[in-house]
Amino acid sequence: MMPEMMPEMMDESPDDFRARARRWLRDNVPTEHPPVDGPESRAYALAWQQRQFAGGWAGLTWPRAYGGRELPVLQQIAWFEEYARAHAPSTHNALFVGMNHAGPTLIACGSDEQKAFHLPKIMQGDVIWCQGFSEPNSGSDLASLRTRGEVQGDELVINGQKIWSSYADIADYQELLIRTDPASSRHHGLSWVICPMDAPGITVRPIKTMAGPAKFAEVFYDNVRIPLANIVGGLNNGWKTAMATLSFERGTASLALQISLSQRVEELIAACDDVALGETLMDLRADAAALRAMSYQFAIKSESGPVGSEGSMIRLYFAELAQRVARVAIDIFGIAAPEVLAVHGLGYDYFDAYSETIAGGTAEIQRNIIAERVLGLPRGSR
Amino acid sequence: MTMFHASTEQLELIDSFTRPLEELFAPARLHKSESDYGQWVTGAEFGWFGISLPEAAGGIGLGMVEEALLFEKFGRHLVTPGFMAASLAAKTAYLCGDAALAQQILNGELPVAMARQGAPGAGVTLVDAASAKLCLVLSPQGTALFHADAVVERQPLDAAQWSIPLQSARLAGNAAAHAATQKIGADVNLLLAAQLTGIAAATLDMAVSYSLLRQQFGAPIGSFQAIKHYCTDMAMQVQAAKDMLSFGAVAVAEARDDHRFQAASALVVATRAAFFNTAKNIQIHGGMGFSAECDAHLYLKRAHVLDTLAGGLKASRAALRRETSIFGKDAA
Ligand SMILES: Cc1cc2nc3c(=O)[nH]c(=O)nc-3n(C[C@H](O)[C@H](O)[C@H](O)COP(=O)(O)OP(=O)(O)OC[C@H]3O[C@@H](n4cnc5c(N)ncnc54)[C@H](O)[C@@H]3O)c2cc1C
């Protein structure tokens, strides 16, 4: 299915693109708030994705061959800017994994069959993806993971446990990282597999976050059988695929959120009449402007190839700035204000922001990576 | 195509344009002599004062992006703020229709010093002004160019303390400006931000090199996590300041609606980056960092001088508050 807009797009100017995005968002952004978790949040996220796809706004940078628009990242940013200004639903929803790292990983490492089957489904809002990397004893030290997959004929038989898997309770597929060579250690002998979440032997136990909703989950695998054809990037070559996933997770994944931070700061400035907070707010304002400038630079650079660990710097800058912004909102309004207590209100945002420096690799791990890969400092003891 | 950041060509051009800095403006020179006025004519000959003025006016005919990149290099080399004074003075004269005065500044005939005045009638702080013939006064009212004689009651301050000659002084009551403008506030912010960004970048490089070199406990100190994380924080400050500067300079060059907001943001980000990095650089150098022989303190002190010329971080934040972002209320 081709989205409606194709002909008019061909030689549209950036300004026209923006204007069209603004008009469409004005007419289409849902007025009802997103449900916080569970099946309702799934239905809402999928419906909103379907609407964006039908409007021609999904998969802006994805390959044409799989229904994407293959536009430059700068155009994607223009869309996100209008998206933020229109107060469209946060991209930090159940679609996040599929759109921002599972999809991109498949584009980078998947087979033609895998891409042809999965990419359109993700883009069209048919499916939800989740990520199964972390385990109870393997967090920052991901390469120590122990969930195993035994090759039996043309299948893998999987046993073990994952944890903190966001949206696992409402997902159709999981990017699952497992040890497929029993004799291997560390980052050797791993495989990245597409795990259908309805496969027999999978048990999901949702876990509530400190912000309230049950947003992530434990996942148990008891003799789960998955075809070898579901391996992405080759048997025992999963570390490489996982690094691609993390490069997206730490690179482009937060682009929309980075951009929307400027919007949030402006709203706080407009709401705040406490002179004592003026200087703090101006620092946040300037830093959000710098984050936007960095996002543009990242987008420009990524046109000529993968950007690498520099992405970690922007991701971390964003994470810490998002926490400062969320915190000052509580100072401005106080803990008892309706704006703070509301569902998806400032209190929720504040608590949720604590995850920014944990999920996707902690701030400390990011700092180690930046020091070693960007600045060239020596690896030290861990 | 719409531009958002400095292009590779612009970066390369400025690299070659500033090659003489390595030899002529090694930061260590400031241990011997705090003033750069000995190099005034050199600066003029290289065309460094008029990079963004049209060729017909005696300039180089490039734009604000190149000028910002040039001053980032000046910041790295702790070049006297007098060069910024010259560039802004020539621009002020040019915008006020005094082409002859602009030309004399560009030729190097009339050295310029920079001063900051907090409010009308208040005293001024003059930087590196001993041989200056003109004085460019920055104030909340804009940019005004005076004859040096108009700055009176000069009290020299201890040059060694801030590693640059400073004077406290007053503008004579009857002093009339040769030229004055309110139109180049964004340019002023960008040039200050550029030098502060250069300082942040130079101290990051210095810190990383030392972290690789200095050994303790049988390993380079850069292998210790505390040092690594300081360096990473410094690198993030540099990336933010550089990208903000480049984005802001393009916004000014392209006269984008929000260019004043972008330039004011660039100053706030760069000032904080410079203060953070110069302090951490001293810490990373240990006892050496605290010694007068080490260059580390030169950067810290210059950051303070530039911040003073900007009117102070408090004022820079207050100025940012007056600007409008595209995400602001009116746009939404
Ligand atoms: C909201 C949220 C969503 C998540 N979603 C998913 C998901 O969908 N899929 C998934 O697989 N995982 C997910 N995670 C898990 C996340 O990736 C891990 O929590 C993270 O990698 C840290 O691992 P850990 O929790 O085991 O902490 P640990 O690794 O035990 O870390 C504990 C503390 O020790 C520090 N530390 C550890 N090693 C070092 C070191 N070498 N140097 C310095 N400090 C160190 C850490 O920085 C941290 O402060 C999610 C987490 C959160 C909070």
Image (spheres, rainbow, N blue to C red):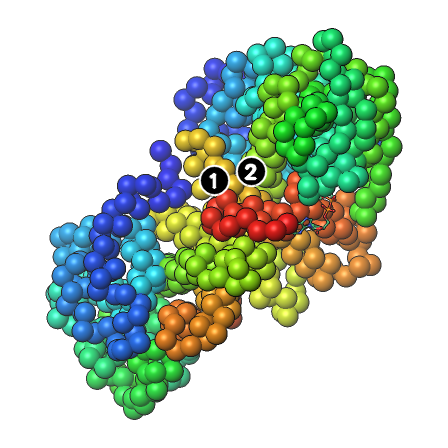
Q: Amino acid at mark 2?
A: Gly
Please indicate, yes or no, whether residue A322 appears anywhere in the rendered image: no
Whether ligand 1 has any atom under 8 Å from the Cβ at mark 2 is answered as no
Whether ligand 1 has any atom under 8 Å from the Cβ at mark 1 is answered as no
Q: Local crowd at mark 2 within 10 Å, few (<14), some, or many (≥20)?
A: many
Q: Quadrant of residue B126?
A: bottom left
Numbered disc 1: secondary structure: helix
Cα distance in 3D space between marks 2 and 1: 9 Å
Residue for point 70% across, 61% down = A332
Chain of the residue displaying label 1: A
Q: Quadrant of the N terminus of chain A?
A: top right
Q: Amino acid at mark 1?
A: Phe
Chain of the residue displaying label 2: A
Expressed as whole percent of the image width and height from the top left, the position of residue A255 reads 57, 39
Q: Nearer the viewer, residue A77 or B143?
A: A77
Q: Nearer the viewer, residue A137 or A46?
A: A137
Do badges 2 and 1 share one subunit?
yes
Q: Nearer the viewer, residue B120 or B124?
A: B124
Ligand 1 visible in quadrant: top right
